[in-house]
Amino acid sequence: MSKKEILMQPNNIIKGKYTCTALENKLFYKILFNAQKQNKDSSKYTCMLTRDDFKDVFKNNNDLTQKNINDMLITLHQTILEFDYIDKDTKGLITYKSGLIGESKYIHDYDIYEINLHEILYKHITDFLQMQKVGNGYTPLNLELLFRFKGAYTQRLYTFFRLWSRENKTVEVKYKLENLRYYLKLESDMYPEYKVFKQKLLKRALNEINEKGNMKVEIKEELRKNRKINEIVFLVQDHETRKYFGEKIDDKECIKKPELNQIAATDEIIDFYIPNKKLFTQKTLNDFMKDFCTYDFKDINYKKALQESILITLEQDNEEKIKAKAYNYFKKTLTNKLIKANSTSNKPIPTVKTRFHNINQSFNKYSPDELEKMLIESQKDKFK
């Protein structure tokens, strides 16, 4: 590649279920990148690939034949991609299933391929504003780095770690074994025993990532359930930047940090500042970490949004802590406030009335420090 090509990959597609070879996976990523780069007419869910684009996939020019290209495109057409997303209108959970690509056309006069993508997939990778909303999120992938990997499983696992990593910080990432197998679309008879899965797939992929990926990954712990390995805890240190060229999307600055997918998020990240921990149970604290761990709650606006949401939830249930039954209410409240914090809109935040407010008061009148005092004061009797 003559210049950096950065694919802003939606996090739910990273966790999508599909299987293909390393070359086919490279071509799929190249198609997604070109769709993002060439995104102009949203009524046509297509992108164009030149002969040079295929050269990035086929490193050996002898393999760059019309037949090989056609065969690979047919395979992508027949390979099923499955991922979950939240419908923008109904707010319901949807499971998408379709080929990695739709039909393709070869334009002989210009030696160009026109690739069609399914409308839902196309909109997922080109609707940059939607990517930045809470509950969605994206992960920046440097294709030049990703294309160094020869193994298809290495490519996929790298993106799983990249989703949770932080630049030049060591973080713990936990995946359930069954979820890794699900994402990689491993059949039950493929590496059925963990020791074989670890030796034949996991170790080989980690070795290649550590050698070529500008990232260091090791297995910290293997957690058992009913005497079988149930979860794997990885230590991940990523030296690759998460911000390229100022990381402008659609001529607008991205939000401060990418948001993580909240659908089936079983992994964890430990390096995360959480104010007011004592106001959560252990379960709701873990849920909070998974759902909001990319927000820097040292930021005055985010911290204020969190404190307001805690106050509202505790007042709603008259409890001393946010418990499991109230977590969804808390999550929705905080999500709405974080969206407003990220919004460029000039609309005022609606007044919220609780026992801490008179009729003409709102949380806008309080600083984070004042809200902190209110939290402590309101809960002090419950912690005696």
Image (cartoon, rainbow, N blue to C red):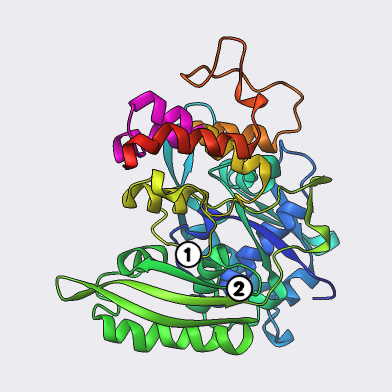
On screen, residue 225 versus residue 186, left or right, reads left
Task: Report the residue at 70% width, 45% height from top.
Answer: 128
| Quadrant position of the C terminus in the picture | top left
The magenta stretch is: 309-331
Task: Report the residue at 75% width, 27% height from top.
Answer: 345
Task: Report the residue at 65% width, 55% height from top.
Answer: 104
Q: Is residue 210 in view? A: yes
Residue 23 appears at what percent x and percent y? 59, 76
Residue 253 appears at what percent x and percent y? 79, 47
On screen, residue 164 versus residue 48, left or right, reads left
Whether 71 is drawn above or below 14: the answer is: below
Element carrying mark 1: loop
On screen, residue 360 versus residue 19, left or right, reads right
Q: Is residue 45 in view? A: no
| Residue where numbered disc 1 is placed | 270
Q: Is residue 51 magenta?
A: no
Q: Amino acid at mark 1?
A: Ile
Provide the major secondary structure of the magenta segment.
helix
| Residue where numbered disc 2 is placed | 169
